[in-house]
Image (cartoon, rainbow, N blue to C red):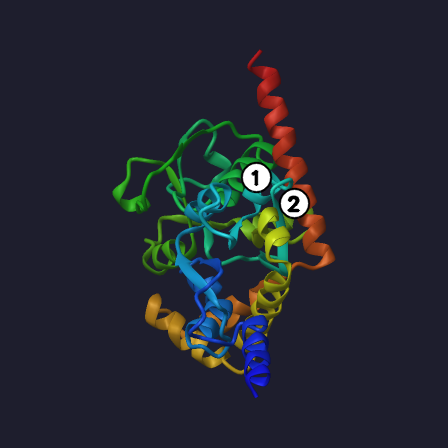
Amino acid sequence: MDGECQLQKDIKKLYSIDKDCKPTLSLGQVDFVNCLPINLPIKLEKIHINAKIVNAIPSKLNKMILNSEIDIAPISSYAYLENKDKLTPIANLCIASNDSADSVLLFSKLSIEKLQDVDIALSHASATSNILLEIILKKFYKSNNRFHPLASYISLIDSNYTAALLIGDYALREANKAAKNIFVYDLGTLWKTYTGLPMVFGMWVVRNEVIEKYPEEIKIVSNQLRQAKEIGLTNMFNTVIKTAQEKVPISEDFYKSYFNHLSYELTDECKEGLMLFEKSFKDIRAYCELTAR
């Protein structure tokens, strides 16, 4: 009888359904609307993941996972591409757009064609989007700009900059109140227009040493993250939309379109877009190093 009880305990531990078990892993989450389809089923315990949850903006999660302060997280694609020797994609999950991203937006007092040599504020919350903007302006518009990474959120209206890049909920809120004389450019649309490929903004990854230490737990968490995504985009989709409206009040129709524009599956086409993004920023880096000599 005692052996049977122990067996039951072992099974519960293996599948991470023992809620009294102390979490072995830590899981980062981005508290933005675009991550709700994955975050909300976990938060409401439709999927129970036995991990310590850490909420932060992407740029913070980038630093935490590289400093071994967290095990699994959705991080900027740029951070992954620069650290492929330390990180491995998990659950085949990403945040990508195959046209408009709707929450990666450049707000400008001038049209994009007239941004030559102006100062542009970069998002404090992202690495990928900041690099993407530089690629778009330098490669596609042949524009030279001075980029200023900000330490916190700032509205273009309240700044002295000619243009400012915002992502996530910050971009949604700004777009919802932007004056009519402000130009708004969707970086997902611009990338698709010039490359014909999806833009992968973020990816769920795990540190390699964590896979080596906890291989079975990582397999389980990977499956649970995928299950959370499926539930969030199907059975809980209406709840996801209502929660999004509570976070950033915009119409239901907008959010239905918003989530349909996003891809959470790291498809072969997304991987192709990711490879082109990597090549593009490396080309720009090499050019800058060459001209600086």
Residue 253 percent across, percent down from the top left: 46, 75
Compared to 219, does 286 lie above or below?
A: above
Name, please, the residue furthest toward the left.
158
Q: Nearer the viewer, residue 200 or 4?
A: 4
Q: Is residue 104 left or right of residue 207?
A: left
Q: Nearer the viewer, residue 161 or 85?
A: 85
Q: Amino acid at mark 1?
A: Ile
Q: Nearer the viewer, residue 99 or 170?
A: 170
Q: Is residue 6 left or right of residue 54?
A: right
Report the residue at 54% width, 42% height from top: 79
Report the residue at 57% width, 39% height from top: 136
Q: Quadrant of residue 33?
A: bottom left
Label 1's element? Answer: helix
Q: Amino acid at mark 2?
A: Tyr
Name, please, the residue furthest toward the top.
293
Q: Quadrant of the C terminus?
A: top right
Q: Is residue 159 left or right of residue 215?
A: left
The answer to whether residue 199 shows anywhere in this view is no
Residue labelled with disc 1:
136
Label 2's element? Answer: helix
Q: Is residue 202 left or right of residue 166?
A: right
Numbered mark located on residue 194 in the image: 2
Residue 151 percent across, percent down from the top left: 33, 39
Assess disc 2: are there few (<14), some (14-19) or many (≥20) residues with their C-alpha within 10 Å of its C-alpha: few
Compared to 9, does 69 lie above or below?
A: above
**Dot placed on the residue nearer the N-terminal end, 1 or 2:** 1
Q: Quadrant of the N terminus?
A: bottom right
Residue 134 percent across, percent down from the top left: 53, 35
Residue 282 percent across, percent down from the top left: 63, 31
Q: Are marks 1 and 2 in contact (CB under 8 Å)?
A: yes
The answer to whether residue 41 shows anywhere in this view is yes
